[in-house]
């Protein structure tokens, strides 16, 4: 069992678990979207609400199109 998040686009569950320093993701296509709303300021204002897990790359891109104020970067892809 791991920590559960929800995809902001469709609300589907995303589970992330760490075992012996290795991350496992469900679904396997999970991506992490790390964004920022401003160039400077406290982390809570700049990026905390722009860090999301998405079930796949297309969901992350769809969310990014709906939030042009967030400067984005997909930082990781899940592994099976």
Image (spheres, rainbow, N blue to C red):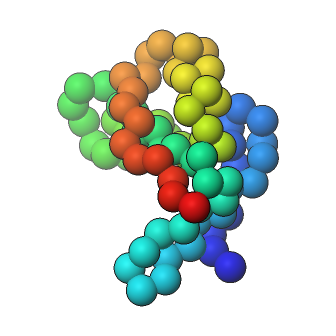
Q: Quadrant of the N terminus?
A: bottom right
- The image position of residue 63, as x and y in percent, is 60, 24
- The image position of residue 27, as x and y in percent, is 67, 54
- Asked which quadrant contains residue 3, the reply is bottom right
- Asked which quadrant contains residue 35, the reply is top left
- Asked which quadrant contains residue 15, the reply is bottom right
How many numbered discs?
0
Compared to 68, does 75 lie above or below? below
- Relative to residue 5, is residue 21 drawn left or right? left
- Relative to residue 55, is residue 34 drawn left or right? left
Compared to 68, does 58 lie above or below? below
Q: Quadrant of the C terminus?
A: bottom right
Residue at 55% x, 14% y is: 65
- Relative to residue 17, is residue 40 drawn left or right? left
- The image position of residue 54, as x and y in percent, is 60, 41
- The image position of residue 9, as x and y in percent, is 71, 32
Confirm whether residue 71 shows in the render: yes
Q: Residue furthest left?
A: 40
Question: Which residue occupies the foreground of this view, 39 or 66?
Answer: 66
Question: Which residue occupies the foreground of this view, 43 or 60?
Answer: 60
Residue at 37% x, 42% y is: 75
- Relative to residue 24, is residue 15 drawn left or right? right
Question: Which residue occupies the foreground of this view, 28 or 14?
Answer: 28
Residue at 47% x, 47% y is: 77
Compared to 27, does 2 lie above or below? below
Confirm whether residue 51 shows in the render: no
Residue at 42% x, 86% y is: 20
């Amino acid at each position: 069992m791991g920590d559960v998040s929800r995809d902001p686009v469709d609300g589907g569950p995303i589970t992330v678990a760490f075992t012996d320093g290795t991350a496992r993701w469900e679904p396997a296509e999970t991506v992490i979207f790390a964004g920022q709303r401003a160039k400077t300021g406290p982390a809570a204002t700049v990026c905390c609400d722009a860090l999301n897990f998405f079930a796949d790359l297309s969901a992350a891109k769809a969310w990014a199109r709906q939030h042009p104020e967030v400067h984005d970067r997909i930082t990781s892809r899940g592994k099976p």
